[in-house]
Image (cartoon, helix red, strand yellow):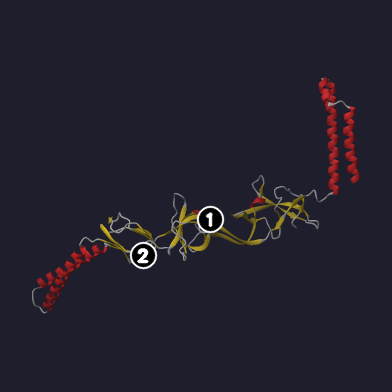
Amino acid sequence: MKHIFTLLIATILLASCGGDKKNESVDTIIASGDISKLKDKKKEIEISQLDFANQLDLINEAISTIDTVKNLSQITIFKATEEVFNHYLELQGSVTTKQNIVISPEYNGVLTRVYVKEGQRVKKGQLLAKIDDGGMSQQLAQLQIQTNLAKTTFERQERLWNQKIGSEIQYLQAKSNYEAQQEVVKQMKSQLAKTEVRAPFSGTIDDVMSDQGSVVGAGTSQLMRIVNLNDMYIETNVPETYLSSVTKGKKVLVEFPVLGKTIEATIRQAGNFINAANRTFKIEVAIPNNDKSIKPNLTAKLMINDYSNEKSFLIPQSIISENAQGQQYIYVVQDVGSNNVGITKRVIIETGKTQGDNIEILSGLTLNMQIVEEGARSVKEGQDVEIINQ
């Protein structure tokens, strides 16, 4: 075969050199303007091109006879194996809590005392601040004295009435007067209680907004913010297509990019109402916060496991092609010999859900099929290929 190469190359060189000496150059013929010489030269070149093409075919045939491996397309493969596939629905949300409020006063007056400071832990019902009552406490003391007198009068009239002494009207008047005084005292105490600002729940004073000595108005002024970081949750909208798979009790992976942490949580509530405007329903995901590192309005990424397959085939999406009929296919290698050379075969597949760069294969693959990975886009049906990662 080496002699064939030598003879072919020599023939080409001789033909080329001999032709240059025998014939006039193309430039000379063009300059002469002789149409018959130009046509003859064109015919001569066409014959030479055909001769060269035939010689190249002979060379290629000789190369393929001598070298049966190095000229093959080189590919890598991987075997189809069954594995657990978990698909996750990814959503965005932010942390919130129902116990995060700004406390406003219920009484108009001067803020005489502020008993807490920022960052302080408080218990439910604890006194946080005091507003000047404008003399209401003295009025209450006077009313209490009058109520005590009314009580004594009523008790005496009641004893007399039980002994059938005195008139019924006197007894009823004393009773009515005592009850009326009690109601007045009760109302006064209720009003006086509004001058005391107490914690509506246990939590942390996040911000004190009004200073001691400032004038505050009922329902308009902001005294302080109190936050409870124990009852944190994420509320987000889920497309209605996931109504049957995203349900109460479902496990959720919650990632906090700012904190660089991921925790496992649970859907504690799934809405029963579909928003007609965006075709979504709401869910609440309870967030454990033992170290108090998670704060309200913190951005989070939720990954909800909405589908699982214990025995699935996963392949890279990059190796899948599509034919004119819209069918998806991949290439596998069959009849692999000892020299790692095999034959490609096109396999029509049906795909399922994706996760990252991989996609689930629902049909078309069987266990241990040798799937073409690198080189999948360049091979053809029935092509001899060399496996380089066997």
**Residue pictured at 90% horizontal, 37% vertical:** 11
Residue farthest along the left direction in this orientation: 166
Against 379, is 194 above or below? below
Q: Residue 201 bears which disc, if any?
A: 2
Left or right: 302 as drawn, with respect to 207:
right
Left or right: 33 as drawn, with respect to 331:
right
Residues at marks 2 and 1, CA–CA distance in whole angstroms: 34 Å
**Residue pictured at 83% horizontal, 43% vertical:** 60
The amino acid pointed to by label 1 is: Glu
The spot of residue 228 in percent (x, y) is 40, 63
Residue 339 visible:
yes
Kindly state the secondary structure of the residue where label 2 is placed. Answer: loop
**Residue pictured at 88% horizontal, 39% vertical:** 9
The spot of residue 1 in percent (x, y) is 89, 46
Using the image as rendered, state which of residue 190 and residue 169 is in the foreground: 190
Kindly state the secondary structure of the residue where label 1 is placed. Answer: strand
Left or right: 217 as drawn, with respect to 58:
left
Pair 2/1: label in front:
2
The spot of residue 193 in percent (x, y) is 26, 64
Q: Residue 90 bears which disc, if any?
A: 1
